[in-house]
């Protein structure tokens, strides 16, 4: 069974940093591109970042470019999101999601981890 | 970035109804469109990809159609478990973008 479990969310002050993790199991993690997608409270979905299976290709939404860094450790079946210079508008539930066939749609999602940026 | 616009934003329907949700892309995206269902407090669930291909395990009452800029999600006979918010998503070009969502409520 495919499982994605996010962790690392919490309360952080504006300008602070946080590192999210996503532990994957039930599939060959190293064969799949992975993504972070977020959802602000009461709002819609926003794609944040993608990383290819071997980390060769990395993409970011303009809203986080230069502040967030996506990475992965295939030996540990783990995906990460380093978030720096956090702003109030980064407050959201962050989901990790598997990219089916590296095409850009997401066939499995984690349960999400809440990041709150507030003073 | 490609803008995705869904309509309506919300509506009420009854169990057994046939419902249709529309998604329009700001430029042509061929058939690179997915639909997701999300229930409160839960992660989104993939329903359809490639505009009309049903994800494994998704009931056949769900169907998708369209290509280019105009797409539809149809639920042929609404069930109680279908009351949720639905999102379209284009994966034609980065940045991947979602529609704003359509909430289907019980009448």
Image (cartoon, coloured by chain):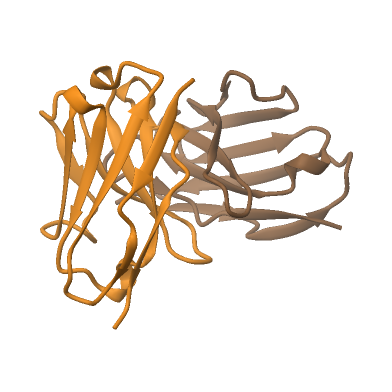
- Answer left or right for B77 relative to A4: right
Q: Which chain is orange in the rendering? A: A
Quadrant occupied by the C terminus of chain B: bottom right
Q: How many marks?
A: 0
Q: Position of residue B26 (x, y in %)?
A: 41, 50
Please give left or right for residue B73 compared with residue A50 in the image. right
User: Between residues B52 and B83, which one lies in front from this camera angle?
Assistant: B83
Of residues B6 and A106, the one nearer the viewer is: A106
Q: Nearer the viewer, residue B7 or A94?
A: A94
Residue A106 in view (yes/no): no
Q: Residue at x 37, y 17 (%)?
A: A27
* Colour seen for chain B: brown
| Residue drawn at point x = 55 percent, y = 39 percent | B36
- Picture layout, residue A85 above or below residue A71: below
Query: Front-most of B58 and A110?
Result: A110
The percent coordinates of residue A31 (x first, y second) are: 26, 17
Q: Residue furthest bottom?
A: A119
Q: Residue at x 31, y 16 (%)?
A: A28
- Looking at the image, residue B86 sits to the left or right of residue B25; the answer is right
Can residue B61 be seen in the rendering of this structure? Answer: yes
Q: Residue A63, position in %: x, y?
A: 24, 61
Measured along the vertical axis of the image, is residue B51 above or below residue A118?
A: above
Q: Residue at x 29, y 83 (%)?
A: A119
Q: Looking at the picture, how far across and down is residue A87, in whole percent?
A: 25, 73
């Amino acid at each position: 069974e495919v499982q994605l479990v996010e962790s690392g969310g919490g309360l952080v002050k504006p300008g602070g940093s946080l590192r999210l993790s996503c532990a994957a199991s039930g599939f060959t993690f190293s064969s799949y591109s992975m993504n972070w997608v977020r959802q602000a409270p009461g709002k819609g979905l926003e794609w944040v970042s993608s990383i290819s299976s071997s980390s060769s290709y990395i993409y970011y939404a303009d809203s986080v470019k230069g502040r967030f860094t996506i990475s992965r450790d295939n030996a540990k079946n783990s995906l990460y999101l380093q978030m720096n210079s956090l702003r109030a508008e980064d407050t959201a539930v962050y989901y990790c999601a598997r990219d089916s066939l590296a095409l850009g749609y997401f066939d499995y999602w984690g349960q999400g981890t809440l990041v709150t940026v507030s003073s | 970035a490609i803008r995705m616009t869904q309509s309506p934003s919300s509506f009420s329907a009854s169990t057994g109804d046939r419902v249709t949700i529309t998604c329009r892309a700001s430029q042509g995206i061929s058939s690179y469109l997915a639909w997701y269902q999300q229930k409160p407090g839960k992660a989104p669930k993939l329903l359809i990809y490639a505009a009309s291909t049903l994800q494994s395990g998704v009931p056949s009452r769900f169907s998708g159609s369209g290509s280019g800029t105009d797409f539809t999600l149809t639920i042929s006979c609404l069930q109680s478990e279908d009351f949720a918010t639905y999102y379209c998503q284009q994966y034609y070009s980065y940045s991947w973008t979602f529609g704003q969502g359509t909430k289907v409520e019980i009448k």
